[in-house]
Amino acid sequence: MSTIAQASPPSGRTGLWIGWTMSGLLLAFMTFDTVIKLLDLPVVIDTMKQLGIPPELDRLIGAIELVCLVLYAFPRTAVLGAILFTAIYGGAITSHMRLEDPLFSHTLFGVYLGLLAWGGLWFRDERVRALLPFRR
């Protein structure tokens, strides 16, 4: 009979630092992405056209991202923010798959962001670790 041990993050402060660093990277990138959409920059308009999304939706998408960003930034609502971000990333992945964009640089970029979002929470929140246990 074998024993299954639940993996635990690095102890105490180290795990918290890893979690907040991962979450901070996500927050920094998503802040940048939200701001350029809200400012209606030409690069956003061009990208929206390439993805087949009406460019006039850029500010609405930016506003939705801003709500997700605020929710994710606060520990009390971070899980809800991560869930909503996951939905946004799923849409982005689908858009890139439809266009047959490069896999690792474009299509999977939403997966990388999702890993940062959930990985950051996993390291800093024991409730998330209880929901997503890793076993060795």
Image (cartoon, rainbow, N blue to C red):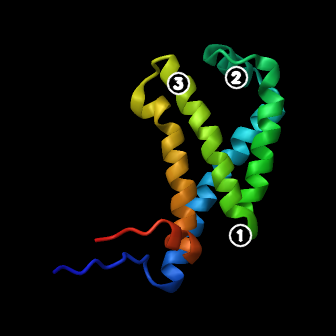
Q: Mark 1 is on which residue type?
A: Pro
Q: Can you identify the residue that label 2 sits on?
A: 43
Q: Which residue is mark 1?
A: 75
**Callout 3 secondary element:** helix
Residue where numbered disc 3 is placed: 96
Of the residues tagged 1 and 2, which is closer to the observer?
A: 1
Q: Position of residue 123 (x, y in %)?
A: 51, 71
Q: Are marks 2 and 3 in contact (CB under 8 Å)?
A: no
| Labels 2 and 3: the sequence-earlier one | 2
Q: Is residue 28 above or below residue 125?
A: above
Displayed quadrant of residue 80: bottom right
| Residue 88 at x, y percent in the picture | 65, 39
Q: Amino acid at mark 2?
A: Val
Mark yes or no: residue 26 visible. Answer: yes
Does residue 45 appear left or right of residue 129 in this picture? Answer: right
Quadrant placement of the N terminus: bottom left
